[in-house]
Image (cartoon, rainbow, N blue to C red):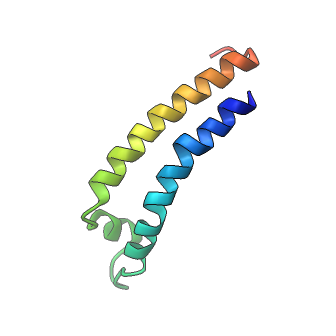
Amino acid sequence: MGGVAIALLNKGLRPFLAKWHPLLQTWEAQRPPHLSLKEHERNWSQEAKLRHELEALRRDLEQYANALAIIAGVEQ
């Protein structure tokens, strides 16, 4: 089970966060005071790409979760 968890971190979460977290932080720091966080994020030119990659990550994480459930003997 530990191997699956390590793979989840190293092949799933870590690369996604390493790429997108600093980019999003940089964009968020540029938010004008009159815009809400949500509105400012929607104005980001990378927003659609981020959401697309986030959805792909979600699907991958679901596969890992299913594998962990099988290993742990948990009904899905």
Where is residue 67, by image quadrant?
top right
Q: Please say if 36 is above or below 2.
A: below
Q: Looking at the image, which residue is at 67% across and 24% down?
A: 68
Q: Looking at the image, which residue is at 68% across and 35% down?
A: 5
Is residue 2 or residue 26 the one in the foreground?
2
Residue 9 coordinates in the image, percent (x, y): 61, 44
Where is residue 56, by image quadrant?
top left
Query: Quadrant where the C terminus lies?
Result: top right
Query: Quadrant where the N terminus lies?
Result: top right
Q: Is 8 placed left or right of 29 in the picture?
A: right
Q: Please say if 6 is above or below 17.
A: above
Residue 10 coordinates in the image, percent (x, y): 59, 44
Q: Looking at the image, which residue is at 58% across and 29% down?
A: 64
Q: Please say if 76 is above or below 18.
A: above
Q: Looking at the image, which residue is at 48% across and 33% down?
A: 60
Q: Please say if 2 is above or below 32.
A: above
Q: Is 17 placed left or right of 4 in the picture?
A: left
Is residue 51 or residue 38 the one in the foreground?
51
Q: Is 1 placed left or right of 67 in the picture?
A: right
Is residue 11 or residue 59 the one in the foreground?
11
Is residue 39 or residue 18 the one in the foreground?
18
